[in-house]
Amino acid sequence: MITDIQVASRLFLAAALGGIIGFERQKHNKRIAGLRTHILVTVGSALIMLVSIYLFEAYAGKAPVDPARIAAGVVTGIGFLGAGTIIRSGENVQGLTTAASLWTVSGIGLAVGCGFYIAGCTASIITLATLYLLRKIPIEDKQ
């Protein structure tokens, strides 16, 4: 069984990783989903993964429990949240990157929740690099 200390540390790590990414979004005026939203998505995903693991361990041999099924619901649910951040005005579309970052932090939360820390931390670094560093690369519109 996972100890209470492990549960708390996983949730706090998820909050920290989601917060760093959310801070980047908010810092660049992407207020549709900023610091608080990213923290909540990451912690919620980690919590759902922890519940999945708990149920799997608690009902092992007693009932068929698949921890992946509950986690898969997170991926679907986040799609609806992300869709709410996308705004289309004529030919312009805004919010796609923020929607993608919400989807990514949900994955980070799932990874941290199941104890896959290296994947969660590495994904956070890659996400931050993508959001911050690639912003500085000029991309021409080829129309």
Image (cartoon, rainbow, N blue to C red):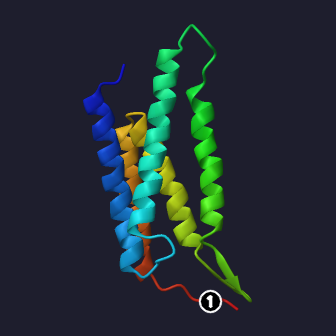
Residue 125 position, x and y percent, is 35, 57
Please state the horizontal and vertical placement of residue 135, each as a whole percent of the image.
Answer: 44, 79
In the foreground, 111 or 3: 3
Residue occupying image coordinates x 30% and y 54%? 16
The image shows residue 22, relative to residue 77, as above or below, that is: below
Left or right position of 50 against 99: left
Residue 137 position (above or below residue 45): below
Does residue 13 appear to the left or right of 79 in the view shown? left
Q: Residue furthest right?
A: 90
Residue 83 visible in the current orientation: yes
| Residue 18 to residue 34: above or below | above
Q: How many marks overall?
A: 1
Relative horizontal placement of residue 57, taking residue 71 as reference (left or right): left
**Picture coordinates of residue 62 (x, y %)?**
58, 8
The image quadrant of residue 22 is: bottom left
Residue shown at 47% from the left, 54% from the top: 41
- Residue drawn at the location 47% of the way across and 78% of the way down: 30
Q: Which class describes the residues within 10 Å of circle 1: few (<14), some (14-19), or many (20+)?
A: few
Q: Classify mark 1: helix, strand or loop.
A: loop
Check the image and name the residue furthest to the bottom: 143
Q: Which residue is mark 1?
A: 141
Quarter of the image for residue 3 reads: top left
Give the amino acid type for the residue marked by disc 1 in the picture: Asp
Residue at position x 35%, y 40% in the image: 117
Q: Is residue 69 above or below residue 125?
A: above
